[in-house]
Amino acid sequence: YCSLLNRVLCSFPLCLPGQCAQLSVVCNLWQCHLRFFAPTMALLQSCKLFPAVSSFSPCVTLLPSRASSWWSHVEMGPPDPILGVTEAFKRDTNPKKMNLGVGAYRDDSGKPFVLSSVRKAEAAMAAKKLDKEYLPIAGLAEFNKASAELALGETSEVLKSGRNITVQSISGTGSLRVGANFLQRFYKYSQDVYLPKPSWGNHTPIFRDAGLALKAYRYYDTSTCGFDFAGALDDISKIPEQSIILFHACAHNPTGVDPRPEQWKEIAAVVKKRNLFPFFDMAYQGFASGDIDRDAWAVRYFIEQGINIVLAQSYAKNMGLYGERVGAFSVVCNDADEAKRVESQLKILIRPMYSNPPLTGARIAVSLLTNPELRAEWLQEVKGMANRIISMREQLVSNLKKEGSIHNWQHITDQIGMFCFTGLKPDQVERLTKEFSIYLTKDGRISVAGVCSSNVAYLAHAIHQVTK
């Protein structure tokens, strides 16, 4: 018995926090031994049947514990480069510090900006005392219709023939992921996705985690800080037929470099000739140039050329609805019947992913897109945001010249949208941070939204100091 009890007790590891149940079992076993078996052992000892019993002492061996967690093998992941920039910025006590890493619009005082049209839409919604019921799987029908019209144009043949399907999704990221999962499951011709080099950092994990294979085509020319048109065209012309190719519709992130219309035409011709399948990511319609039609030109041109596409939209930047997570995913099909079948499968994909999309942001977007007065005000405000970004680019170049810089900074004004690839090298970026408390990613990308009238001269001075 003693041997058996000892083995039972030794099977329990050292009691750690959260293992109180094991300790309770051990205590109960030992109490049971003392109460029922100790007298018997004393009798046996007195009869000298088991002389060794008197020397017995309980041996509760403290063995090494089993793994303290199911997840002890999980390694620490690398920090997000942009969030890392923000954390370092927060720790800095320099009153002149600048955060040029985060991709969110700021007003000329450096403060988060909520559009007046959005405030009015929210007030009108509050006055109506609307319910908070679940949306359908595909989202708010009015939102989907308005989103398709915004992207494709109200007079689009695609809309008139009903050969498109648009579903509401969780901003641009969610729209891209829904699209990636749909292609992985139903695009039977290829599982290869060609991204511009570079592309938005989240594109890679979105498509990779959906099970697609990632490839790249040339896009950015480091020698000119501009579009490598020849390289892009050459690479695209060699992509295997029927492969998937991703394009930024406008305001390429992270470079701010967009093809000109005549260049888009040549790209579309090669895409059509190679029978490639375009996936457009349009996160900045209206925010890039201030003109919603100009920013959607490439998307509409491809469709006019008979090229069916898929499209991800986001309302984070152009309506300032960052935290509302408002976006849409569209598929342009051959006919209305095909569109209905695609819609049915998109719903099947979405249901286990997030069931249905958020309600409030979609209602705000619908108000801005369909109410004539709010739409006019929104268009004016989005143009104002775009113009402020353009103005900051111009002022930065002007101040660099005032500092006496002899470098050619024209690429800063040639680029468009929230982000600018400055051409700064990693060692120069490091100096900007250490010497001037200016925070940006190591590749030299800055968010122009973080520049304002009160700090643009300081930024120009710092850039000149590390580049002269």
Image (spheres, rainbow, N blue to C red):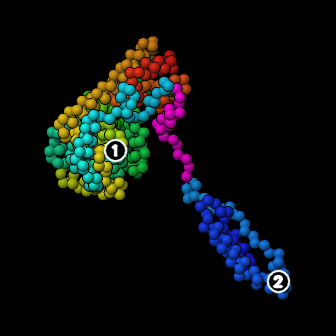
The residue segment tinted magenta is 74-94
Identify residue type, mark 1: Arg
- Sequence-wise first label, 2 or 1: 2
The residue tagged 1 is 325
Residue 90 within the segment the image draws in magenta? yes
Write the residue at 18% across / 54% down: 337
Whole-percent x, y for residue 426 in the image: 51, 28
386 versus 171 height, above or below: above
447 versus 322 height, above or below: above
The residue tagged 2 is 45
Question: Are the residues at dot 2 and dot 1 in contact (C-beta closer than 8 Å)?
Answer: no
Q: Is residue 295 left or right of residue 435?
A: left
Indicate the secondary structure of the residue bearing disc 1. loop
Residue placed most toward the observer, 54 or 432: 54
Indicate the secondary structure of the residue bearing disc 2. helix
- Which is closer to the viewer, label 2 or label 1? 2
46 versus 234 height, above or below: below
